[in-house]
């Protein structure tokens, strides 16, 4: 089946379509700079393009190259990342820049194996860098590409099984361009991502606009939304957290650095407690009557719903012991790496 599709020109169709109809004006495109491609690939993991655009430009303005990013403190990186979510990406991003600087002399390695050995870079991200920047004949397999290829191939194996995912990697590799790789691979790689993002969407795919529809097994059966097949469901959990929003009359707020691992690891945050009683016990008895409960709201993480209970207090007392942190003035805390819901709460207190 793979050979048949390859002969029918899957890669040729994708390359031609991308050149005319694909996304060609994003700020991380039309470049062979691995720093920009890597930065965009990390930011785009589980995050929409429209959200990434502003963060990408701000990161480049602050850290124009990998050496500048490596020289920054983790706090500076997390502060600029604040609100983008999935903060392990930011910590790995910073460590990756340090490793590129210290181990590879400030230059991203050429081989996918060496790229994949860097923090936060998996097989698909390594392939994206190698194909987009160096023209290497390697396949990416992110969520969009999985959807395009499983539909086109009629690949009905359950991707919850690692053996089936390996099989899809093999199929993806066999479909890659075979000639003029330095020019064709960036177009092809960008093309399959663009198809998944704009045409071969999860719901209501635009099959009539798809350049590979004549080759597509799912289009022939009229059941594209059957693919990809993945039976294992992620179990969601829930957690209630009480947040002490302590503020002095001069606008200073009490913040501490969150431990790693854990929720919002490495970020500065208002003190968190498992219940209202624990929060109350952490403040001096004479000010407990001044605690004001705010409305409870839900913050959705990938696998967990956080039910956040903000409790405000204006005080001149030093309050709880903070291992790493303290009081930050109104001109200081906005520059820290803060979880998005904490930042929102502090701006409205």
Image (cartoon, grey):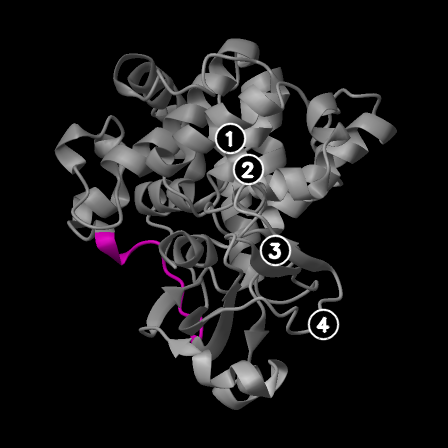
Q: Can residue 313 be seen in this view?
A: yes
- The image shows residue 153 at horizontal and vertical percentages of 35, 43
Query: Label 1 neighbourhood size at 10 Å, few (<14), some (14-19), many (20+)?
Result: some
Q: In this view, does 192 lie above or below 331?
A: above
Task: Pick out the residue farthest to the bottom.
Answer: 277
> Which of the two marks, 1 or 2, is nearer to us in this view?
2
For marks 3 and 2, give the CA distance. 13 Å
Q: Identify the residue under disc 3.
A: 268
- Which callout, 3 or 2, points at the residue further toward the start of the chain? 2
> Which of the two marks, 3 or 1, is nearer to us in this view?
3
Give whichever of 344, 11 is nearer the camera.
344
Query: Label 3 neighbourhood size at 10 Å, few (<14), some (14-19), many (20+)?
Result: many
Query: Label 4 neighbourhood size at 10 Å, few (<14), some (14-19), many (20+)?
Result: few
Q: What stretch is highlighted in magenta?
A: 225-236
Which mark is on residue 40? 1
Q: Identify the residue under disc 4.
A: 321
The kind of secondary structure element at disc 2 is helix
Kindly identify the residue that appears in the image at 59 percent across and 18 percent down: 133
For marks 3 and 1, give the CA distance. 25 Å
Q: In which quarter of the image is the N terminus?
A: top left
The kind of secondary structure element at disc 1 is helix
Which mark is on residue 80? 2
Q: Can residue 120 be seen in this view?
A: no
């Amino acid at each position: 089946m793979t050979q048949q599709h390859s002969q029918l020109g899957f890669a040729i169709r994708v390359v031609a379509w991308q050149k005319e109809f694909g996304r060609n004006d994003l700020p991380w495109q039309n470049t062979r700079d691995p720093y920009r491609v890597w930065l965009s690939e990390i930011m785009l993991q589980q995050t929409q393009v429209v959200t990434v655009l502003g963060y990408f430009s701000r990161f480049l303005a602050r850290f124009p190259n990998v050496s500048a990013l490596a020289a920054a403190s983790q706090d500076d990186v997390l502060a600029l990342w604040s609100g983008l979510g999935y903060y392990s990406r930011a910590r790995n991003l910073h460590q990756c820049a340090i490793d590129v600087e210290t181990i590879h002399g400030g230059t991203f390695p050429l081989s996918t194996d060496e790229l994949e050995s860097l923090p936060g870079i998996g097989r698909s991200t390594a392939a994206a860098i190698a194909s987009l920047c160096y023209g290497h004949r390697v396949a990416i397999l992110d969520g969009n590409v999985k959807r395009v290829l499983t539909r086109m191939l009629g690949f009905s194996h359950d991707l919850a099984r690692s053996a089936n995912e390996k099989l899809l990697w093999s199929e993806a590799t066999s479909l890659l361009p075979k000639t003029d790789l330095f020019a064709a691979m960036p177009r092809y790689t960008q093309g399959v991502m663009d198809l998944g993002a704009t045409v071969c969407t999860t719901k209501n795919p635009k099959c009539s606009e798809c350049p590979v529809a004549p080759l597509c097994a799912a289009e022939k059966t009229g059941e594209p939304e059957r693919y990809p097949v993945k039976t294992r469901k992620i179990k969601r959990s829930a957690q209630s957290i009480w947040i002490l929003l302590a503020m002095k009359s001069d606008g200073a707020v009490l913040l501490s650095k969150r431990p790693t691992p854990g929720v919002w690891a490495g970020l500065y945050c208002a003190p968190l407690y498992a219940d209202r009683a624990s929060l109350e016990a952490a403040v001096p008895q004479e000010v407990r009557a001044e605690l004001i409960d705010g409305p409870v709201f839900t913050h959705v993480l990938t696998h967990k719903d956080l039910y956040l209970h903000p409790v405000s207090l204006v005080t001149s007392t030093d309050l709880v012991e903070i291992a790493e942190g303290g009081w930050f003035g109104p001109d200081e805390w906005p520059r820290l790496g803060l979880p998005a819901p904490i930042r929102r709460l502090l701006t409205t207190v």
